[in-house]
Amino acid sequence: MTRFTTRKKVICSVLITVFFVFLIFNILWFLHFASYKKFLDDKFVMLSGSLTSFFDQTEPTHFGIKKPPYLTYGGNLYAVSADQANSIIIWPTLMCKEIQEIGLIIEDDGGMGYMVYVDENMEYDTNKNMGASIEWAMSAKSLLQERQSEINELFEQAKTRFNLPPHKSPE
């Protein structure tokens, strides 16, 4: 009989632990989700059919916010140039305290698109683009260099629009 009672105690302890871990995970997610509110203002409109995506098309440069879906932490901010040839995606850290990563989507005149990670200076981040072929990386770097001033301007607009925190340097 004591063996059965001990087994019940272990099962109850495990269930209580799982419940509290799940509760803490939910609270942490909710706080992170709510931290995206600081980027929203009255110009943002909720995307139809979504509770987590917002956009602002009141200016030539379009801005958007993608809050993290339930129990995920992968939200982002983005800015798209008026000609839609350049887009910057910004991934904040937990609670949106810093910028964790910056991605750039650039399209050349032939319609070829490149998605690359860049650093806070909008320069190609070799460490984060490790899987790219040498030829692809050279083409992306060349296009990035060609459009450097446009991309820098777009990033400055995004930093101003979202009142962005500083970029978290990799350690």
Image (tube, rainbow, N blue to C red):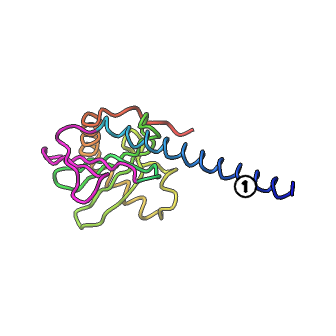
Q: Nearer the viewer, residue 151 or 141?
A: 151
**Picture residue at 34% right of the left edge, 55% below the top:** 142
Which quadrant, please, contains the C terminus?
A: top right
Is residue 2 found left or right of 143 in the rendered image? right
Q: Residue 32 placed where, x, y %?
A: 43, 41
Q: Is residue 3 above or below residue 119?
A: below
Which quadrant, please, contains the N terminus?
A: bottom right
Q: Residue 140 placed where, x, y %?
A: 37, 57
Q: In this view, does 2 lie above or below 161?
A: below
**Picture residue at 60% right of the left edge, 45% below the top:** 20
Q: Please, which residue is most extreme toward the right here?
A: 2
**Picture residue at 12% right of the left edge, 45% below the top:** 58
Q: Residue 33 placed where, x, y %?
A: 39, 43
- Mark 1 secondary-structure assignment: helix
Q: Which of 23 and 127 is in front in this view?
A: 23
Q: In this view, does 35 lie above or below 129?
A: above
Quadrant of the image occupied by residue 167:
top left
Q: Residue 153 placed where, x, y %?
A: 24, 40
Q: Give the range drawn in magenta.
A: 40-69
Is residue 9 found left or right of 114 in the rendered image? right
In the rendered image, residue 19 lying in the magenta stretch gets the answer: no
Q: Nearer the viewer, residue 19 or 25?
A: 19
Q: How crowded is mark 1: few (under 14 residues within 10 Å), some or many (20 or more)?
A: few
Q: How many numbered discs sit on the rendered protein?
A: 1
Main SS class of the magenta portion in the image: loop
- Write down the residue under mark 1: 11
Instruction: Give the amino acid type for the residue marked by disc 1 in the picture.
Output: Ile
**Picture residue at 25% right of the left edge, 49% below the top:** 54
